[in-house]
Amino acid sequence: MIELRAPMAGNVWKVQCGPGDRVAESDAIVILEVMKMEAELFASASGVVKEVRVKEGDAVEEDDVLVLIEPE
């Protein structure tokens, strides 16, 4: 299982996938707002989204698991 983790603390601005969605390597999955700037987080491998652990507006800390992806 691949874990998409927050590289820094911030707020979830947009979640661009849901459970069951297929994602390709380097698809933008989550957008964080960090110090008034957007930080896109990308899938590191192709697969199927198994779990989304955050929703838009959530505050996250560095290294929090945001999304779980089952690789193909």
Image (cartoon, helix red, strand yellow):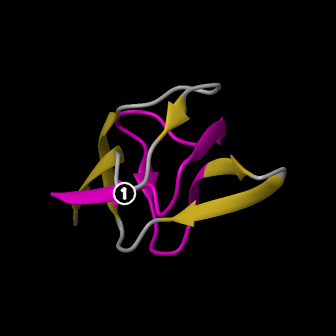
In the image, is residue 4 part of the stretch drawn in magenta? Answer: yes
Q: Residue at x 22, y 64 (%)?
A: 71
Residue 5 in the image: above or below residue 44: above
Along the line of sight, the residue nearer the viewer: 13 or 46: 13
Q: Residue at x 35, y 47 (%)?
A: 64
Q: In this image, 47 relative to 8: left or right?
A: left
Q: Residue at x 46, y 34 (%)?
A: 18
**Position of residue 66 measured from the top left corner of the image (x, y, whole percent):** 39, 44
**Quarter in which the N terminus is drawn:** bottom left
Which residue corresponds to mark 1? 4
Q: Residue at x 31, y 51 (%)?
A: 48
**Position of residue 39 measured from the top left corner of the image (x, y, whole percent):** 69, 61
Along the line of sight, the residue nearer the viewer: 36 or 2: 36
Which quarter of the figure has residue 51?
Answer: top left
Number of marks present in the image shown: 1
Q: Which residues are magenta?
A: 1-30
Q: In this image, 21 relative to 49: left or right?
A: right
**Quarter in which the C terminus is drawn:** bottom left
Residue 39 in the image: above or below residue 53: below
